[in-house]
Amino acid sequence: MSAPVDFNDRMLSLGLARVAEQAAIASASLIGRGDEKAADQAAVNAMREQLNLLDIAGVVVIGEGERDEAPMLYIGEEVGTGNGPGVDIALDPLEGTTLTAKDMPNALTVIAMGPRGSMLHAPDVYMDKLAIGPGFEEGVVTLDMTPSERVAALAAAKGCAMTDITVCILERPRHEELIAEVRATGAGIRLITDGDVAGVMHCAEPEITGIDMYMGSGGAPEGVLAAAALKCMGGQMYGRLLFRNDDERGRAAKAGITDLDKIYARDELVTADVIFAATGVTNGSILSGIKRSPGWIETETILMRSKTGSVRRVQYRNPFEG
């Protein structure tokens, strides 16, 4: 029996960037066309095809859904050639299908990879999320604080007024009370319609995005992807799974989660060093969207390694027919 192959994040990183790029390119012709499912399926097909070219023994731990819900890139699906290291893969082939269909900002293709067993197998339930950027003492804000206490604590840590804080929140009816409480502090709010992985990533670069903090509930799988990004970019994140019924609690049990009230810190959501890639589909605060010109297609990808803290931006210009 041969020895297990080590996870060589440096060698795999450019391959991962190509996976994100090709998924974005595949969805390019569907930007603004109003067909969310077609855009998502195009990205899924391309991402799967590219993953299967990599020399990895990969397992999708965060994917398109359970096997009976998703024909491809489902949770538990094995990808890669099988001739390399065992890796966990978290992905969202098109984060912001609605954004893509409507040609709205911040649609991304997103993928993270780490050693086998490095990512929480988050069930498809909601997660209460809280994130801030780098440079603060651990625990300066917590999920146990009220929203207004979080704004006050972050303002104190930054040495600024609460009116200088901007919070990113997903625009949903369930967040009406949260939004009202944050606004009552004098803080500003950037409401987003979709794409909370990008929302969390915005916290890591406040000087570029103008976002200081992310809070609110969204999909738990996206929470793991966001934690992978922040592990590379720097920043703090906390998540607590939210359950609405016994079916959702059963999903957690199936994923091996026994403490249903646990608050996960960033490094509990993603426990080992990972690599992360995202390509812009539509223009956004972090990445430029796909540009098409006669005979050419251009993408911008952010490629990050948590081991070194390196952040690489890759401009890809490729001849394109169609």
Image (cartoon, grey):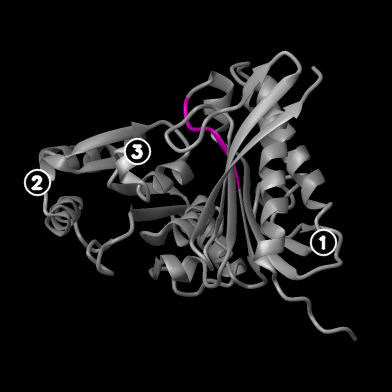
Q: Please name the amino acid that badge 3 sits on.
A: Thr
Q: In which quarter of the image is the N terminus?
A: bottom right
Numbered range of the magenta stretch: 105-110
Task: Mark 1 or mark 3: name the one nearer the start of the chain.
Answer: 1
Toward the top, the furthest residue is 294
Q: Which residue is drawn at 72% across and 38% down?
A: 22
List x then y, in percent, for residue 123.
Answer: 56, 58
List x then y, in percent, for residue 175.
Answer: 30, 40
Q: Determine which of the numbered discs, if any, sits on residue 209 in the image.
A: 3
Q: Please name the amino acid that badge 1 sits on.
A: Asp
Instruction: Give the spatial CA distance, label 2 vs label 1.
Output: 51 Å
The residue lying toward the viewer, choosing from 83 and 260, is 83
Crowd class of label 3 (few under 14; some 14 to 19; many from 20; radius 10 Å): some
Q: What element carries label 3?
A: helix
Q: Determine which of the numbered discs, if any, sits on residue 55 in the image.
A: 1
Examine the structure image and report whether residue 107 is included in the region drawn in magenta. yes
